Image (spheres, rainbow, N blue to C red):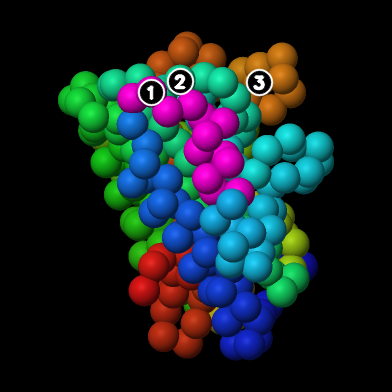
Amino acid sequence: MIPLKTTEEIGYIRESGIIVAGALDKLMKVIGPGIKTIELDRLAGEFIHTKGAESAFLGFKGFPKSICVSVNNEVIHGIPCERVIKKGDIVSLDIGVVKNGYYADAAVTVGVEEIKEDAEKLMHSTREALFKGIEKTFSGNRLGDISWAIQYNVEKAGFSVVRKFVGHGIGKQLHEEPQIPNFGSPGQGPKLREGMVLAIEPMVNFGGYEVDVCDDGWTAITKDRSLSAHFEHTVAITANGPVILTLIE
């Protein structure tokens, strides 16, 4: 059963979402050649704590850090470490926050200084696919409308959507029903209703859609070692349409 949230609950999720957006904004301003991914984790963790919140990821099923940092061919769940960011890298930053018992989650992929044209196109197409999916997040639509919009726009650009990992409902838990695949057919799946809150997150590979999971048990990488990009927002379905809860006002 897909949980529905009251207006008050959506307000709490929005409060967490503002912190997520603030943390992402902070990291996007400091990321550059020479910075270690563990430093990005430290900065995000400090920011989250100053806002009276906690990382939603730290300790979740044993995840050891506050945020996920996935570089180049890493799709999601990259563990911050001593790795040094280099010019030309593309870096996915995924941040989840919980405050007052309510969760929010968002991700962006950024290019570090000069990046190749193909990488720029991949990031642009992934972000665009996210917003095409959000455009379908209306009460009365079906979940498959979101999935199809993402898949259609990604494949139209010549890229692949990851199948192994999907988006999810969010609110009192980091992961709630429903699962939100980034592929599917329009008009299929559960009907969307006012009060649903969804974390929509296309993960897009430059090459094939298959992925491997590294020996650390977390980091997912493209099977063909091509680049990957990831964008995500937490979105509430309201009487006035979709409202993105992880944007800075």
Q: Earlier in the sequence, mark 3 or mark 1?
A: 1
Spot occupied by residue 102 in the image (x, y as percentages of width and height): 69, 70
Q: Amino acid at mark 2?
A: Val
Can residue 246 be spotted in the picture? Answer: yes
Specify the segment rendered in magenta.
Answer: 33-45
User: Which residue is pictured at 58% across the width and 66% down the height?
Assistant: 51
Instruction: Identify the residue position indicated by label 3 in the image.
Output: 213
Instruction: Say which mark, if any, is on residue 34.
Output: 1
> Helix, strand or loop at disc 2?
loop
Q: Main secondary structure of the magenta part?
A: helix
Of 221 and 104, nearer the camera is 104
Q: Nearer the viewer, mark 3 or mark 1?
A: 1
Spot occupied by residue 198 in the image (x, y as percentages of width and height): 57, 63
Spot occupied by residue 223 in the image (x, y as percentages of width and height): 53, 15
Extreme residue in the top direction: 224
User: Which residue is pictured at 23% across the width and 25% down the height?
Assistant: 115
Location of residue 84 (image quadrant)? top left
Of 220 and 63, nearer the camera is 63
